[in-house]
Image: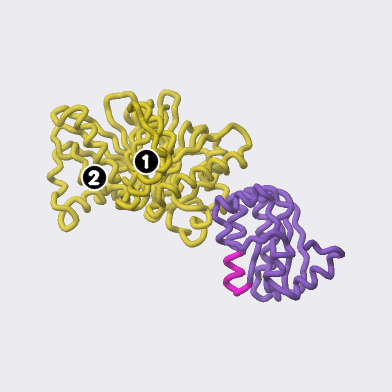
Chain colours: A yellow, B purple
């Protein structure tokens, strides 16, 4: 694997910046510029970089969709949230609609925010393209067919002209797909979800979203520690604070930044990516959670540093 | 993790010492369990965290369970005298919204029970002010 590219990072529901929020960002940037002149695009770009994400950017609003760039010709994705629409447009822009492509798509589960982008994934409508959609759920195909047609959507599933195959994968055993070794782990979530561990060329990426950790069961903790063991990157559901995840939002099927750091420390993973952001959180709040999580990692570290970052739409991580 | 407790009128002050992590949290849970029983005469529990230098998510879960049980019987629970690192962990995990945090045991007793505060001051030759 060469690279991870995030096309959708928001949990539950897409969000978009409002006009008022854009205006606040502009006002903050202008205030910090304090009348300064920029004599080149480079100078301007450097200034924007210094402003930081809450002022100069946004953590984005598409729901879950993550691309793994393997170095091969075939595309690999995790989940079909709304982020798959811009992914599809980008592939079409790169190759043109007449060049057939193969897509390997690994589904964590079939809740709406993880499948809602599929009706808008243009390559699925183009003959010659090949889609292999993998998951641990027997009902994966039925879930995707159900949202694709009246009364939910005007176009029936039968209009998809690509060659689409559904492949159910068993958890806890290795599968070989697109030059990678892939393993699934059953996770605690309403209707179940599956985490994925991808390994190729000596690099390991774990995609573990929509997963609640009950904390009381050491055997369950150990299962995840072994699943995360030595991973280069762990993409982790950090939707809630720990307090919320185990009190008012217990059994909602999600986890926290605190548990992400603890599991990654125990597993000696190298990088933790906070993912599946709570839609109620704005950019300032997500940036604050990142700062706090880095501090928590620092004060609880008992070995090598765990690099902590937070996902945003458009983020790339080189492996 | 060491654990001791002391009653002041209708309040029990429980004092774990050490770190409350995956290994020791079950011991804290067992030690607190009798105090959380509805048939006791304990009106409130104060956890004196002066000797706790670290608490993990599993330890915080024990506090959550204790808080839920105490709330269910309309009794209070508070945590006092957090070390700076533990205070940070409370802040980052948002546990300061779950359990009332007090600067000291005496502050906690002053907020929760005047008889307990009086008993505490009587028992302390030079009560901290």
Q: Is residue B71 magenta?
A: yes
- The total of numbered circles placed on residues is 2
- Disc 1 and disc 2 in contact, CB within 8 angstroms: no
Q: Quadrant of residue B40?
A: bottom right
Kind of element beneath mark 1: loop
* Quadrant of the rendering where the N terminus of chain A is positioned: top left
- What is the crowding at mark 2: few (fewer than 14 residues within 10 Å), some, or many (at least 20)? many
* Quadrant of the rendering where the C terminus of chain A is positioned: top left
Q: Does residue A159 appear in this view?
A: yes
Which residue occupies the foreground of this view, A208 or A90? A90
Magenta residues, dominant SS class = helix
- Above/below status of B68 relative to A35: below
Coordinates of residue B62 in the picture (x, y in percent): 61, 58
Q: Give the residue furthest to the front.
A: A35
Q: Which residue sits at x=73%, y=68%?
A: B12
Residue corresponding to mark 2: A118
- What is the crowding at mark 1: few (fewer than 14 residues within 10 Å), some, or many (at least 20)? some
The chain ID associated with circle 1 is A
Question: Between disc 1 and disc 2, whose residue precedes?
Answer: 1
Q: Is residue B9 magenta?
A: no
Q: Does residue A174 appear in this view?
A: no
Discs 1 and 2 carry the same chain letter: yes
Coordinates of residue A207 in the picture (x, y in percent): 41, 39
- In the image, the segment drawn in magenta is B67-75
- Above/below status of B116 relative to A295: below
Residue corresponding to mark 1: A57
């Amino acid at each position: 694997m060469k690279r991870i590219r995030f096309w959708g990072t928001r949990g539950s529901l897409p969000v978009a910046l409002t006009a008022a929020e854009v205006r606040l960002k502009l006002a903050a940037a202008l205030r910090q510029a304090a009348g300064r002149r920029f004599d080149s695009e480079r100078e301007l770009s450097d200034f924007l970089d210094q402003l930081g994400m809450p002022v100069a950017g946004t953590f984005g609003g598409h729901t879950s969709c993550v691309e793994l760039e393997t170095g091969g010709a075939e595309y690999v994705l995790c989940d079909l949230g709304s982020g798959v629409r811009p992914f599809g447009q980008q592939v079409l822009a790169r190759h043109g609609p007449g060049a057939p492509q193969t897509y390997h798509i690994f589904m964590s589960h079939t809740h709406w925010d993880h499948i809602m982008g599929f009706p808008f994934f243009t390559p699925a409508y183009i003959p010659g393209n090949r889609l292999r959609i993998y998951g641990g759920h027997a009902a994966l195909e039925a879930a995707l067919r159900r949202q694709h047609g009246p009364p939910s959507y005007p176009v029936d599933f039968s209009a998809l002209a690509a060659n689409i195959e559904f492949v159910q994968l068993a958890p806890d055993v290795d599968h070989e797909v697109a030059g990678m070794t892939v393993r699934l782990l059953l996770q605690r979530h309403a209707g179940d979800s599956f985490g994925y561990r991808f390994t190729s060329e000596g690099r390991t990426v774990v995609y573990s979203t929509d997963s609640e950790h009950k904390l009381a069961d050491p055997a369950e903790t150990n299962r995840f520690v072994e699943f995360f063991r030595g991973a280069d990157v762990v993409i982790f559901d950090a939707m809630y604070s720990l307090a919320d995840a185990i009190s008012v939002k217990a059994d909602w099927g999600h986890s926290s930044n605190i548990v992400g750091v603890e599991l990654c420390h125990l597993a000696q993973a190298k990088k933790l990516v906070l993912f599946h952001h709570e839609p109620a959180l704005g950019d300032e709040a997500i940036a604050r959670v990142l700062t706090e999580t880095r501090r928590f990692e620092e004060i609880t570290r008992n070995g090598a540093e765990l690099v902590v970052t937070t996902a945003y739409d458009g983020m790339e991580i080189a492996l | 993790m060491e654990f001791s407790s002391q009653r002041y009128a209708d309040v029990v002050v429980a004092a774990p010492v050490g770190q409350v992590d995956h290994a020791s949290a079950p011991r804290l849970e067992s030690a607190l369990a009798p105090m959380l029983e509805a048939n006791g005469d304990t009106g409130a529990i104060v956890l004196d965290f002066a000797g706790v230098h670290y608490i993990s998510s599993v330890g915080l879960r024990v506090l959550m369970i204790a808080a839920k049980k105490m709330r269910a019987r309309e009794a209070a629970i508070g945590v006092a005298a957090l070390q700076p690192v533990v205070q940070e962990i409370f802040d980052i995990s948002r546990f300061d919204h779950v359990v009332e945090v007090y600067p000291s045991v005496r502050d906690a007793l002053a907020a929760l029970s005047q008889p307990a505060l009086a008993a505490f001051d009587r028992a302390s030759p030079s009560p901290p002010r």
